[in-house]
């Protein structure tokens, strides 16, 4: 199949079915949880960085502190029909997206008397989900797919997936920015697909628009008749870096960094992601299985989501991150405490997500140096840092980036004042002058008063 350049084709994958032989033991050991089960407690070494258990009154919408609705038939200025040929109009109506009062979210496709379809698509407000340096990220949800099969399921296309953060607001840079399809299903088939999209379209190192994918039957009960846990684990603690996909704890698909060239992998993974839940109707993927929407398709069968949670596991233990032995990646997460030298800072345990250390007691004239930061040939134009401040009223200052000298003119900066406490963290972005090549990066702190005004947990750069 084909797709227009720049259009997310996550759902167009025609991928091989993984044999279920050898999964019987794992399926037999799977425990069926009740429909309104709470998200499991994070295992040892993991920290929960996002959770929505979808608790709330029946008939109410989602928590907009966590989610935003994507409505209509495209992103503003983006490709029509969400770039996939699906025919529904996405809405924020509680007829399409609502809580059921029993701890679940329901995304329900509906058809009106004129034959027009509506459905729902929600996306996390956060776009920063990625593993810490040397650590892991796990994104999972417990879902019952729409409980409809056969001709009545023709055109149904539920999905739980993630897109690279640079896509938000651009809508023309797919598939290079990466897409991770954790769960897709079409036609009411007892099968879950997972796919990584990357590289260029069509073709390219990731075989677009198909992507690098696989599928498997849901273990124990069918995907439609029961809840299953669908998850993706992105592992930066191994070499080559790996992204693994699971259903009910069974790993059925893995993509590793050495399957594509280094530039393709870097472009797809050196940034955060946002998470999406939706039910599409019609389009390229269901059409590929010979069953587009028609008069036999039954509306009103919801995808039911018990919870979505995101976990992180820190890399390299819980102590201070040492300076890297080689060059640093400007587009990865540079831990603030991994400085090569500094003046005026302290290192302390942070309560921010991911744990570890931050640098604090930062005031006018202080700095931290990070040697050998590699920006590459494609210019960095953005900078962001994770900061917190318990400074008194009227106390504020600048967090600045300077290159190769502590007294060089800053290439960018942002102002920060009290954020609600010395461990009340927020990510603050700023534009910077274009930077290429490799540089020693100085993080400097300038203020009009001598008082401490900021703590820093990490920093990173972007295009």
Image (spheres, grey):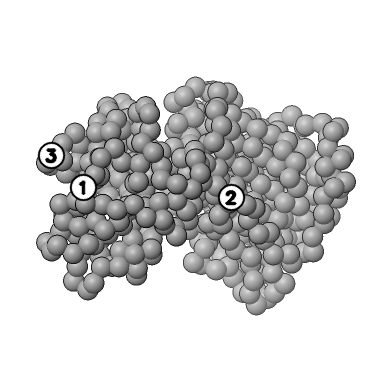
Q: Is residue 87 visible from the viewing direction of this image?
A: no
Residues at badges 3 and 2 in contact (C-beta under 8 Å)?
Answer: no
Disc assigned to residue 408: 3
Depth order, front residue of 366/16: 366
Spatial CA span between label 1 and label 2: 32 Å
| Quadrant of image for the N terminus | top right
Depth order, front residue of 60/305: 305
Residue 249: quarter of image: top right
Q: Element at badge 1? A: strand
From the viewer's perspective, is residue 282 above or below residue 242? below
Residue 439: quarter of image: top left
From the viewer's perspective, is residue 152 above or below residue 341? below
Q: Earlier in the sequence, mark 3 or mark 1?
A: 1
In the rendered structure, the answer to whether residue 21 lies left or right of residue 62 reads right
Q: Earlier in the sequence, mark 1 or mark 2?
A: 2
Residues at badges 1 and 2 in contact (C-beta under 8 Å)?
Answer: no
Image location of residue 399, percent across then percent down? 23, 52
Depth order, front residue of 333/190: 333
Image location of residue 34, percent across then percent down? 79, 64
Spatial CA span between label 3 and label 2: 41 Å
Image location of residue 255, percent across then percent down? 61, 31
Residue plotted at (30% across, 64% down): 389
Image location of residue 15, percent across then percent down? 70, 31
From the viewer's perspective, is residue 208 above or below residue 27? above
Disc assigned to residue 45: 2
Q: Earlier in the sequence, mark 3 or mark 2?
A: 2
Disc assigned to residue 343: 1
Residue plotted at (30% across, 45% down): 383
Please state which of the two labelled residues, at mark 3 or mark 2, is closer to the viewer: 2
Task: Say few, some or many: other residues with alpha carbon within 10 Å of mark 3 (under 14 / 14 to 19 / 20 or more).
Answer: few
């Amino acid at each position: 199949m084909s797709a227009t350049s720049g259009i997310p084709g996550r759902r167009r994958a025609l991928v091989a079915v993984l044999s279920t032989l050898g999964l019987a033991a794992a399926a037999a050991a799977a425990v069926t949880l009740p429909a309104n089960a709470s998200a499991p407690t994070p295992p040892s070494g993991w920290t929960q960085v996002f959770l929505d258990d979808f608790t709330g009154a029946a008939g109410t919408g989602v928590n907009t502190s966590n989610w935003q609705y994507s409505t209509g038939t495209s992103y503003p200025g983006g490709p029509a029909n969400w770039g996939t040929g699906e025919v529904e109009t996405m809405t924020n109506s509680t007829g399409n997206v609502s809580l059921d009062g029993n701890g679940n979210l329901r995304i329900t496709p509906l058809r009106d008397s004129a034959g027009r379809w509506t459905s729902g698509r929600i996306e996390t407000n956060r776009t920063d989900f990625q593993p810490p340096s040397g650590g892991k990220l796990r994104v999972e949800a417990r879902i019952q797919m729409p409980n409809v099969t056969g001709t009545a399921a023709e055109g149904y296309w539920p999905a739980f997936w993630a897109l690279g953060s640079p896509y938000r607001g651009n809508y023309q840079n797919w598939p290079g920015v990466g897409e991770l399809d954790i769960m897709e299903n079409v036609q009411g088939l007892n099968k879950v697909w997972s796919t990584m999209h990357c590289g260029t379209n069509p073709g390219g190192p990731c075989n677009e628009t198909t992507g690098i994918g696989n599928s498997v039957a849901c273990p124990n009960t069918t995907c439609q008749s029961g809840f299953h846990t669908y998850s993706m684990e992105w592992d930066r603690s191994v070499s080559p870096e790996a992204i693994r996909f699971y259903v009910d704890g069974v790993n059925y698909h893995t993509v590793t960094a050495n399957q594509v060239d280094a530039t393709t992998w870097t472009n797809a993974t050196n940034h955060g992601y946002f998470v999406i839940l939706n039910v599409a109707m019609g389009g390229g993927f269901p059409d590929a299985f010979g069953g587009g929407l028609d008069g036999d398709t039954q509306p009103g069968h919801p995808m039911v989501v018990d919870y979505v949670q995101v976990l992180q596991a820190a890399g390299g233990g819980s102590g201070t991150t040492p300076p890297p032995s080689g060059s640093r990646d400007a587009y990865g997460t540079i831990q603030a405490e991994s400085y090569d030298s500094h003046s005026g800072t302290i290192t302390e345990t942070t309560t921010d997500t991911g744990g570890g250390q931050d640098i604090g007691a930062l005031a006018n004239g202080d700095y931290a140096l990070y040697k050998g930061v590699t920006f590459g040939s494609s210019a960095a134009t953005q900078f962001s840092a994770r900061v917190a401040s318990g400074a008194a009223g009227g106390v504020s200052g600048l967090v600045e980036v300077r290159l190769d000298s502590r007294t060089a003119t800053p290439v960018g900066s942002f102002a920060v004042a009290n954020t609600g406490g010395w461990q009340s963290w927020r990510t603050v972005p700023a534009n910077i002058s274009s930077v290429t090549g490799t540089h020693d990066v100085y993080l400097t702190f300038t203020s009009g008063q001598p008082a401490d005004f900021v703590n820093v947990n990490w920093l990173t750069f972007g295009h």
